[in-house]
Image (cartoon, helix red, strand yellow):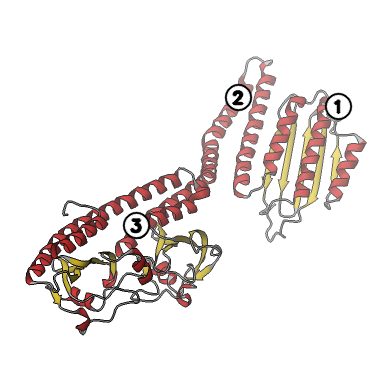
Amino acid sequence: MAAELDLHAVLRRVVLAARELVDARYAAVGVFGRDGVFDEFVHIGIDLDTLERIGQPPASCGVLALQAAVNGPVRLGDLRADPAFSGFPPHHPIMTGCLGMPIRIQDRAVGTLYVTDSANGEFSAEDEQLVVSLAGVAAVAIDNARLRRRSELRDRWSTVSTAVSRQLLAGHGDHSLELILRSARDTASADFATLALLVEPGELQVKATIGAMADGLIGRTAHTRGGLVGPVARTRTPVQVDGPDGPDGAADAADVAGTLLPARVGSFIIVPLTAGGTVTGTLNVGRVVGAPAFTTADTGHLARFAGQVGIAMELDHTRAHRPARLVTEDHDRFDTDLHQHVINELAAVALGLQGLVATSPIPENRPRLNACINRLDATVRRIRSEVYGHTISERRHDDLHHRLLTLLDVHAPALGHPVGIRFTRLADQPLPPGLADDVLTVVRDTMTDLAQHDGASQVDLRVDITDDLVLVEITSNGNGSKPLARADLLTALRRSAGSHAGTLRYFNPSAGGGHLVWTAHNPNGRPRTDNAI
């Protein structure tokens, strides 16, 4: 018997041995759970039909409570005559003689063993000695089986916690709540599970459910100021309730209705979900009325599971939002490197070339050196604009600059050279979609017209956005030609500027080329209160 490690099998062997040793008609053994109520109860001698009519197994009360309270055996000729006898439940067979012995481990009663109705009329002193000895052996076997069960349960919870955490961190975010609930319900041998998250300060909302009685709970809210959930969220202390038939009797509809659980439920546990010392929600499991109550060990295991899962959920959330943050950090790093290293290096090369222009003994090389200097200056301007564009794109969520760069890249092959661009924003809000589209139309149409004029070796684009004005300026050297002078193009551009309370200015420098300035009112800007330009 002591070698058996399954608790139910141990109890089964105990009752079989007890009935055989003392030649009794009935034998039973009960193991106490929380608050002195039988958590395990195994008996022999009553047929199945009678058991179905009796219903629930007995609690630790009446003569059974008396047997558990005393230190030694209790031997009664007729248990019905004892003052502690509280009667048999309906359909229960009538029993007379009774011999019981508490099962103790280290002076603590963990259960009770009793036999009734001796085949010899009454139980003898020898029967009593046998039952006492058997109870001692049963205590060792029950203790071993309990330790084994606790170890297995602890290992099972540990395995489940690790598996769930790994799956969360592996990127199974879409099914993370269902995964958590299914693992908690199955490992805790519960009938249902719910998970509530803090959606507002002081307000929890059910985000996921699984199992019996959980239909219709998603979306239900509860405040952390009261009810059974409130103290869990505020103090991070788990709550365990045994159900309407338990010692606390707290799980009726009025008390449970505000706890994110079904209105009628048996034993249940509510534990906090925490991350970084902050409560992010609650994990709740429960059993139907009539099912065995949860134990203190169950509460401890669920609380540790919720703690580990809460951290994994926070890490999963952080990982999901990490790419965007890293992009911003990379751009900041990129901006700093460009300003401190690349741009400074290019400026130094340009200055060096300017010194060579003044001192070069070969006059024919000076135009080429000046052209190189101009290219370097244009590159520096474009890099600065690119850097600022990254900042605008990431921090202000305005992609106008990116769309402009894409548009210029498309037209560069037709122009035969890159376009210099300077993009400046002093406004806080992005442009309205219609105005941003018109800015792109101005740039696209002018670039198309410039591509049709040969001889232009340099085209520059300037876009300034302030709190009250949008300015687009395009210049081209043209080498004697007159680009951007088509009447239909200028009419269309003047019309689009007028639709935004703006203007169009165009002129051809005497040396050739074109100079166009398109403006529009920025309705998303705010009136300026300073003299900044």
Q: Which residue is mark 2?
A: 353
Q: Amino acid at mark 2?
A: Leu
Query: In the displayed structure, does residue 327 sit left or right of residue 270?
Result: right
Q: Which residue is mark 1?
A: 481
Closest to the observer: 35 or 303? 35
Q: Going from the N terminus, do you reach mark 1 or mark 2 first? A: 2
Badge 2 vs badge 3, beta-carbon distance below 8 Å:
no
Measured from the top left, where is residue 82 in percent x and y? 19, 83
Q: CA distance from mark 2 to mark 3?
A: 69 Å
Please tell me how crowded label 2 is: few (under 14), some (14-19), or many (20+) other residues with Cα within 10 Å. some
Please identify, in this view, whether the residue under mark 1 or under mark 2 is nearer the observer.
1
Q: Amino acid at mark 1?
A: Ser
Closest to the observer: 236 or 498? 236
Q: Which residue shows up at 63% across the image and 15% down it?
A: 361
Please tell me how crowded label 1 is: few (under 14), some (14-19), or many (20+) other residues with Cα within 10 Å. some
Q: Going from the N terminus, do you reach mark 2 or mark 3 first? A: 3
- Which quadrant holds residue 116? bottom left
Measured from the top left, where is residue 37 in percent x and y? 28, 71
| Residue 24 circle label | none
Q: CA distance from mark 3 to mark 1?
A: 79 Å
Please tell me how crowded label 3 is: few (under 14), some (14-19), or many (20+) other residues with Cα within 10 Å. some
Q: Which residue shows up at 41% across the image and 48% down it?
A: 164
Query: In the displayed structure, does residue 161 sit left or right of residue 461?
Result: left
Badge 3 vs badge 1, beta-carbon distance below 8 Å:
no
- Which quadrant holds residue 42? bottom left
Q: Which residue is mark 3?
A: 304
Q: Secondary structure at mark 1?
A: loop
Q: Residue lying at the far bottom in this picture: please name it.
A: 83
